[in-house]
Image (tube, coloured by chain):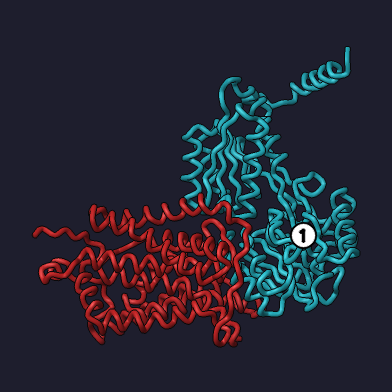
Amino acid sequence: MNRRTLLASAAAMALVAMLPALPVSAQTPFPEGEKLKVGFIYVGPVGDGGWSYQHDLGRQAIEAEYGDRIETTFIESVPEGADAERALTQLALSGCKLIFATSFGFMDAVINTAAKFPDVKFEHATGYKRAENVSTYDARFYEGRAVMGTIAGRMTKSNKIGYIGSFPIPEVIQGINSSFIHARKVNPDVEMRVVWAYTWFDPAKEADAASALLAEGVDVILQHTDSTAPLAKLQEKGGIGFGQASDMAAFKPTPRVSSIIDNWNPYYIRRVGQVLDGTWTSHGVWLGIGDGEVEIGEITEAVPAEVKAEAEALRDQIGSGAYHPFTGPLNKQDGSAWLAEGQKATDEELSSMNFFVEGISAQIPS
Amino acid sequence: MIEWTTFLLLLSAATPILFAALGETIAERAGVLNLGVEGMMITGALAGFAAAHATGSPMAGFVAGAVAGAALSLIFGGLTQYLLTNQVATGLALTMFGLGLTAMFGKPYEGVKAPSMAGGPLGINWVIWLGLVLVPVTWLILNRTRPGLILRGVGENHDAAHALGYKVRGTRMAAIAIGGALAGVGGAYVSIATVLQWTEGMTAGAGWIALAIVVFAGWSPWGVLAGAWLFGGVTVLQLRLQAAGVAVPVQLLSMAPYLATIIVLVIISARHKYAGGGGTAPGSLGRSFHALR
């Protein structure tokens, strides 16, 4: 027996051992010779250079991985809300058996459509509502924000950091808090200015928001919107920023001094594989730097070496699990105690986060 | 809070809508309802960006944006004026066509940078100045010249204009092309001056706002200016107030452009009621013209 057959039989035995544990429902592999159709809906155009672009890379990755066994299709620029249900229904009716809905605001549309198509499996990004055939998956963007916040705190000269928020939802609030906490940690004088754009993708508005922040004396901008417009504005008017969702490498070495990259490829490949071999079940996962789903893009030479080393050390500590970005002592904005010394925020607290931490003067629209 | 820099941001944010809405005003005064403004803007945005990038001259970019916008609008013109297709459906199709076309041809320009634009007098670039100058010019041409009178006549009652011997289709094609060119310049402003790069779908609904402003303005160039400043200005102002950390509820700030619109609409319609005349839609707006004799 050579090593390969040994490994194979070990794997087979492990599988057999696991079999009774699997739920009875529909654990049949996808029929050989038939193509699995996988659909995607994106909130912006695939060419946004950020969020939707990165999801589309994931779509291309599964095509490369599974080749002839699957077929993919996508609908871009789908508005959040009722129209998303139409797009999802269209994908389901066209024969997609696995559908990825890649924005928070698609949540109710996914749940409604999933109820109508029980044999279609849905994967909803960044949401929290699940069903028998609806999984949710998310990335711990706030881990990356901690690293960006550290760089921002060290790099600002005016001690004013700007943040372009999309919508006041937990995912965005986590990012603002995490950036601020870590900027303050390295620079106690730092202030955070927040502008809510109320859009995920509107380059002109994002650029205007960046201009408004710059006019206020901000010299480092973080964004939680999907286009590269704020970076282009920084390039014109000075100041630094970070790639968001995608590396945005075109703006290296400055204004883009680093980036948070959402790498969905491994997750998408794994989930498509599970549908093909019949082991897909509904779950909710939240992966971070340690799992390779959140990556920190190259820190450019515009950042001093010691700051770069500090940021990378923080990244590695978060990745190894040695450090949690939300570790006490931390107070809420109103001064009330949140986390005691050494206490870490639970996932539940994070995924429903609706408050700023102490020190941020901006208000969350309620 | 409302100091010079904010005013500059306001002017800049209003410019794309101002151009597009002025163009649409001219088309609609000639009786043509072109709902393809968004498609013409995005086409102008890409063509303008590509030309500015290739030549290194923003000026060439704006010219290219105008030409591309006009070219696209002539497709609409040919369909609606010669093949007598429905204007609403054709206009909507034009928007989808423009968005799709630019998404396809725009791929090579993603992540490419625009040449920087020189500032003009008072730190206001010459395209903004051009937009401001176009307002009185458009008003003068429409209301105080013979071609303007013919254009309005065609828009109010195309059968009567035809009976008098005026070329309804020719006039309308010209108005459509001018409307397309201005929408193209507005789009080019978004890519060359505001965002400084090409991104698919980057006009993000500005064309629809321009369409709304034309109605809001009662088909008058001055009203268009007021509308563009209101939409663009209040948007900028609310971002600016947020950035300054002013303790005003964000919801109220986000609502402001729409609230202001409603208030102005009420004022305008009240004024019409008492002053009488003006501000109503051209009589033949959206109707196909087919000469029987």
Q: Amino acid at mark 1?
A: Ser
Q: Chain of mark 1?
A: A
> Could you say whether the residue bearing mark 1 is in a helix, strand or loop?
strand
Please tell me whether residue A264 is drawn above or below residue A148 in the rendered image.
Answer: above
Q: Which residue is pictured at 64% across the width and 59% down the height?
A: A169
Question: Color used for chain B?
Answer: red
Question: Color used for chain A?
Answer: cyan
Left or right relative to B156: residue A295: right
Q: Which residue is pictured at 31% across the width and 72% down the height?
A: B26
Residue A196, image x, y percentages: 62, 68
Left or right relative to A328: residue B265: left
Residue B110, image x, y percentages: 60, 56
Q: Nearer the viewer, residue A179 or A358?
A: A179
Please tell me whether residue A135 is drawn above or below residue B249 in the rendered image.
Answer: above
Residue B150, image x, y percentages: 21, 75
**Name of the residue lying farthest toward the top:** A1
Q: To which residue does mark 1 refer?
A: A258
- What is the quadrant of the C terminus of chain A in the image? bottom right
Tell me where residue A61 sits by quadrant: top right
Q: How many marks?
A: 1
Q: Nearer the viewer, residue A318 or B124?
A: B124
